[in-house]
Image: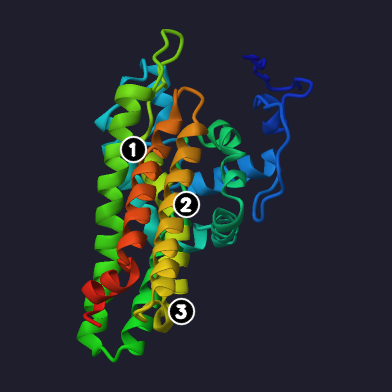
Amino acid sequence: MTILPLSTPGRSTPNSSHQDASSYFPSRAGPTIGIPGQGSLSNDLDGGRRRKADGFDHSMGGGHSGRMHGGSSRHGLGKITSAVPLFLRRLFRFPHMDFQFALWQMAYLCITPRIVYRNIHYHKQTKNQWARDDPAFMVILSGILCVSAIAWGLVYGHGMMGILRMVLFMVFVDFLVVGVIVATLCWAIANRFLARTSVYSTDQSVEWQYAFDIHCNAFMPVIALLYIVQMVFMKVLLKEFWICALLGNTLYMTAIVYYCYITFLGYNALPFVRHPEMFLYPITIFVVLYVIALILGYNVSAKVLDMYFGL
């Protein structure tokens, strides 16, 4: 750490003013990729100052103070209580959200999800946390679910109350409640069995908010396949033919594989998590169930839609 000499009246210290903040920020070696809405490091720091002036801090619940005081508040449930309320307050600050970057992430999560996690170490350096500090992704995801619920309701003639119930169920049950349960389970497994412990670092645990971010990322292809594609081809999937059962079951199997794979990528991006391939193991169980369903001619798509919409 460089200590700058203090200037005194009547004297000027060379290079004591107008210094670039990026000169004091450690750069990370390795290639980065172009991301819409993301500028250079100096621009990111300048933007960070502006966000901080508007109430946006770079750390989760005062992450710098956690390092200064031993980092004990940055572990376990302290991460949830300190980070989540701050994240929720930002949900109502739409002008500060980077919707362009969130849409870029959504597109690549459906095409090449590995790219989304490529610059996560850069995010850790600049934001001092692994999780997102911008709720734009979750806001757009919830908006897509709302539009999808309205579309399903209009197609099948549900009234206003029926559509409202469907919106609430898709957003709060399918996405949030299930997401909190899955994220908490994966978070507990990762911290209990997979995270390395080191005497040289106090930041060797998975943030709960990052675990929920992984769920949000993994849920995007699920929305695309089961809430949009399934609606488009629903008339075909509901026919009582074996080929229709094959198509419907394959659609659900693809969504499950995508979810598990993106979950694996999320934990694999953390340098202190060992054997993240553990999150790929459930795929084996679902493959067995997929084969059994095809042998029996069980149409998963038809059964789920019948349960969901009473078709």
Q: Quadrant of the C terminus?
A: bottom left
Kindly report the distance in space between the C-alpha atoms of the residues bearing marks 2 and 3. 20 Å
| N-terminal label among 2 and 3 | 3
Q: Secondary structure at mark 1?
A: helix
Whether label 1 touches label 2, CB < 8 Å: no
**Residue in the image at 40% along x and 79% along y:** 234
Q: Amino acid at mark 1?
A: Trp
Number of numbered discs: 3
Is residue 306 visible to us here?
Answer: yes
Q: Amino acid at mark 2?
A: Tyr
Residue 287's place in the image compared with 146, above or below, is above
Kindly report the distance in space between the C-alpha atoms of the residues bearing marks 1 and 2. 21 Å
Q: Amino acid at mark 3?
A: Phe
Q: Would you say 78 lies left or right of 282 here? A: left
Which circle, 1 or 2, is nearer the viewer? 2
The 10 Å Cα crowd at callout 2, few under 14, some 14 to 19, many 20 or more, is many
**Residue in the image at 48% along x and 46% along y:** 262
Q: Quadrant of residue 145?
A: bottom left
Residue 43 screen position, x and y as percent: 68, 44
Whether label 2 touches label 3, CB < 8 Å: no
Residue 279's place in the image compared with 93, above or below, is above
Q: To which residue does mark 2 refer?
A: 258
Q: To which residue does mark 3 refer?
A: 233
Q: Quadrant of the N terminus?
A: top right
